Image (cartoon, helix red, strand yellow):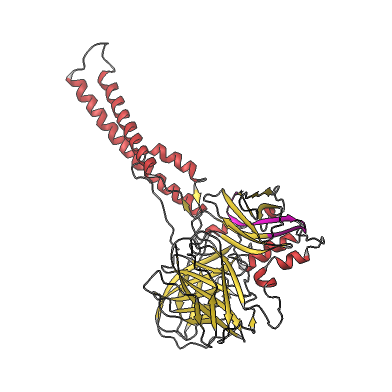
Amino acid sequence: MTKRRHIASPSAAFLLKVFLLIALGTLVFTAPCLAHVGSPDVYFQGQAGPYPITVTVRTPGVIPGIAVIEVRAADATVQQVHAVPLYILGPGSKFPPVPDLLTRSKDDPQFFSGSMWLMSSGSWQIQITADGPQGSGATSVPVTAAARGTLPMTKALAGLLVLLTILIVVALICIFGAARREGSLEPGQAPGPRNLRRARMVMAITAVVLALALAGGNLWWDQTASAHASRMIYAAPALQLSLLPNSTLQLHIGDNKWHSSRPDAVNTELIPDHGYLMHLFLIRTPGMDRFYHLHPRQTAGFDFVDDLPPLPAGHYQVFADIVRSSGFPDTMVSEIDLPDISGKPLAGDDSETIAPPLPNDTGKSSSSATLPDGDRMVWERDASPLVANRLLLLQYRLESPDGKPATDVEPFLGMAGHMEIVRSDRSVFAHIHPDGTASMAALSMAQQSLSLGKVSPAGPSGSDSSSMAMSMSGSMAMSAPVPGNSMPATVTFPYGFPKPGAYRLFVQMKHSGHIVTGVFDCDVQ
């Protein structure tokens, strides 16, 4: 993951840089990646008691900063929606502020929106309560917050500061020169050649001193800002990869001071997500024609190994998902060149996909994928274009060769399906589920807090059990058996593409004991 630095102007005044340093603490923003790469917003679909809702959390541009909450109720009878932010764990999770009433849209009575502060970095949750004729129901959406850069200075402001700097420097040089030239003269007396020479000398010395002061101040600014940034600006841990002689991939998660300096809000220990401490994705580039979803095993601490399956030589982009014990997720990014590997056959929940190379025509899209066993996966979408930064419900249906919905669909890693979204330049990567973009581990922790009485999740009968069971559509409600099926043949993922461009989507489901992956290409405007 590349950390970007924004430098306003090398000639900005020292005093003005001091002002900027003071302001730096409030002028840090979340770059578009946390649990994912290049995908900052949070999307969720589930149940708030008896009411189906979809939620979008627009992560703030500054930390502390304001998150924008958007809730759409599928039930037109929902009358009010409240939201409150709090930490998932720690002291901040025990004393939530008074919930805010979201504003109901005049044009769309089923749409509610509002904003609220996220005061510091860490693993948060937005607890949402919906009220209607069936009573009150609640759910909780995990949200990660962390500063990832500094706000850029506009060209207009930079130009103004440069002009002010020049004005101040010239004024100081003139003032010192005038003081030496005329300070000892009687009123009305003209300065002589000696005074003029000394004045020019003083002006030259003043210019040198000011130049040294500005250069020293600039150096101090860069060092201080860098130290300040290392404490505040998030960067995912480094992922070190090496291939052992026995076709075993060795992985080491590097130290990360950003995490260790926040033991209460982030923690460093790893917890399982979908039953595994790490989800590893290998994508052969540039064609994205090979895709592997693997689950390395932990050897010690932050060291992992994986016995690679048979795979062809090539350059592989690597994404590794982990979750901290606070629910804070990391997606680590690396690359590796691999030779032809005979490897061990895939087993368990590991899977692979062979796909055609990315099309040269970036506007080309696909709506169906033929699977190796002859079945098909169909993307059920209309003809309208995909637009960036808009909540979309991406729906896929698994069907048999005769076009009928599959009747042998099984849970895959406890979910109805998984989707990996990759932009063609790999600047965006997201691993999402039918519940949304949050990790299952964080979502479980957030939902569990509802049962602790922080926000009443009671449905119409006053019991919170149904609300808890229905709040996680991908893992529980979606897993409920349906007549004639083990699971529904259709799965839906809530997501919003963060920026325009060409994307490749890997949609994973399981049926007849086999993991299948449909590959789809699309262009986002």
Magenta span dominant secondary structure: strand
- Asked where in the image residue 455 lies, by quadrant, the reply is bottom right
Q: Can the viewer see residue 491 in this picture?
A: yes
513 on left or right of 205: right
The quarter of the rendered structure image containing the C terminus is: bottom left
Residue toward you, 352 or 243 = 352
Vertical relation: 27 (above or below) 446: above
Residue toward you, 256 or 286 = 286
Q: Position of residue 116 (x, y in %)?
A: 61, 48
Q: Can the viewer see residue 454 in this picture?
A: no
At x 64%, y 84%, the residue is: 407
Q: How many marks?
A: 0
483 on left or right of 184: right
The quarter of the rendered structure image containing the N terminus is: bottom left
460 falls in the magenta region: no
Q: Position of residue 353 (x, y in %)?
A: 49, 81
Q: Position of residue 423 (x, y in %)?
A: 45, 68
Query: Which residues fall within the magenta stretch?
Result: 117-139
